[in-house]
Amino acid sequence: MADLDGKRLIRIGMLGCGVVGAGLAKLIAKHRPDFHRNGFDLRLTRVAVRDTRKRRDCDLAGVEVTTDVMAVAGASDVDLLVEVMGGADLAVRAGCTALARGVPLVSANKAGLARCLPQYIEAARQGSAAIGFESAAAAHIPIIEVLERSLACEEISLIKGVINGSTNYILTFMERAGCEYEEALADAAAKGFTEADPRLDVEGIDAAEKLSLLALKTFGAYFHPDRIHTEGITRITQADIRLALSLDHRIKLVAAARRAGDSLSLRVSPALIHRGELLADVDSEFNAIILEGPSFNQLTFLGKGAGQLPTASAVLNDIVRIVRNPGAGSLPGFARAGAESLKLAGTDSLALCYFLRMGIKEGADRAVLSALGKQGLPILSHSAVDHNGSRFLGVITDIVEESRILSLLPEVGRLPGVAGTPVFIRLDKDNYRDIVEREQSAYFGASLQRQSGAGV
């Protein structure tokens, strides 16, 4: 670190200069007057890229551009390292190298952080260096800062949200365009909304990596992303979208971490969300995160979860926070009592409401519903749609153990009038009955009594 005209000069090395890196370079130039008013300056001195001949969407005049990542991480004229290259190999080695020699790290690399977290923490301990990773969790939503500072001593029971903008865009496109998943994915990829490998988005991997980081900050316990129950959106069809809408729901990819005693449930999966709930209104590349706790009931955060400037701005804010307060790192963070005893709960212990979609023969609606009731499946609501020459029935169950749902699916597929094994999707609300009774009361009065049987 050097002095420049009475101001602290922080020399920045950056790994990667793609969309986010170029955005950061632009923001540094734009906010230089603000830095000066606060007694410091930021200067980009070194950048590592794959191809030095590629044109960049930013001004890199006076910056040493190289392909040697480790040279930037170990350079003596780098006071703070920014990592926006991604990956869980070279990027992790470079970040840990900088940390171990006392250089703070700001990273947008959720995969590297979530999968190699112990290495980062140990390197930061060795070098007494700070780590900032706000941009890795939810882009421009400042959730890490909130969890680290504003809610450090809150007894949070649940953190959940829509935290992958790519899948949210795809599901929104399917709904609005009336198309199937493959067409929506192609549109998202053409617009640059997906990762270079779209499977990271559509199979829920990106969301699981983010959830690993969010659970760490919320509950103090670290679980590798591979241990998180993860499902993507590849099996969602237009029939699912239309049935959900007819039942007054929308489908979103939801990541959720819930604590109950010494048990922590972590899962990423598609979910039906009632249109009266806030998450149902989160469209396209937007993200939303909801926290629940006894002292504040519920807090909601909404913002863009992807894009050049939202992510670059989160990176810059982490840089400024560390510059103004050198000890303001986010790892390992505020230690929470009992975190080491938390155990990961399996999905076999789940008891939720479920949506079942099944193909049925024409005119078989009532017979199938009656047969489902005889199978002991408690149904709260149902709807049927015709799509591409086929008829589909969708039902929402009352609370049932997931293990029972899974055991019933083959039997339901063999019922007269049913074509093929049904597909199930969890509901976001643990107890959908509350919504049903609230809506019925609004129409028929608070004295309405629920009737037993298939359907409402």
Image: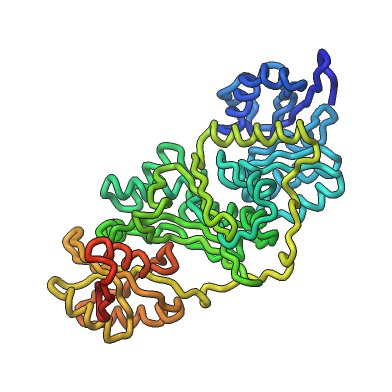
Judge whether 22 appears above or below 108 on screen.
Answer: above
- What is the x, y in percent for residue 111? 62, 50
- What is the x, y in percent for residue 119? 77, 53
Judge whether 30 appears above or below 221 on screen.
Answer: above
Occupied quadrant, residue 6: top right
Occupied quadrant, residue 80: top right
Q: Nearer the viewer, residue 359 or 429?
A: 429
40 sits to left or right of 354: right
* Residue 55 visible within the image: no
Question: Looking at the image, which residue sits at the far top?
Answer: 5
Q: Residue at x 74, y 24 (%)?
A: 45
* Residue 62 visible within the image: yes
- What is the x, y in percent for residue 117? 72, 54
321 sits to left or right of 24: right
Judge whether 403 appears above or below 3 on screen.
Answer: below
Q: Residue at x 28, y 56 (%)?
A: 245
Q: Residue at x 63, y 46 (%)?
A: 146
Q: Nearer the viewer, residue 4 or 67?
A: 4
- What is the x, y in percent for residue 406? 41, 78
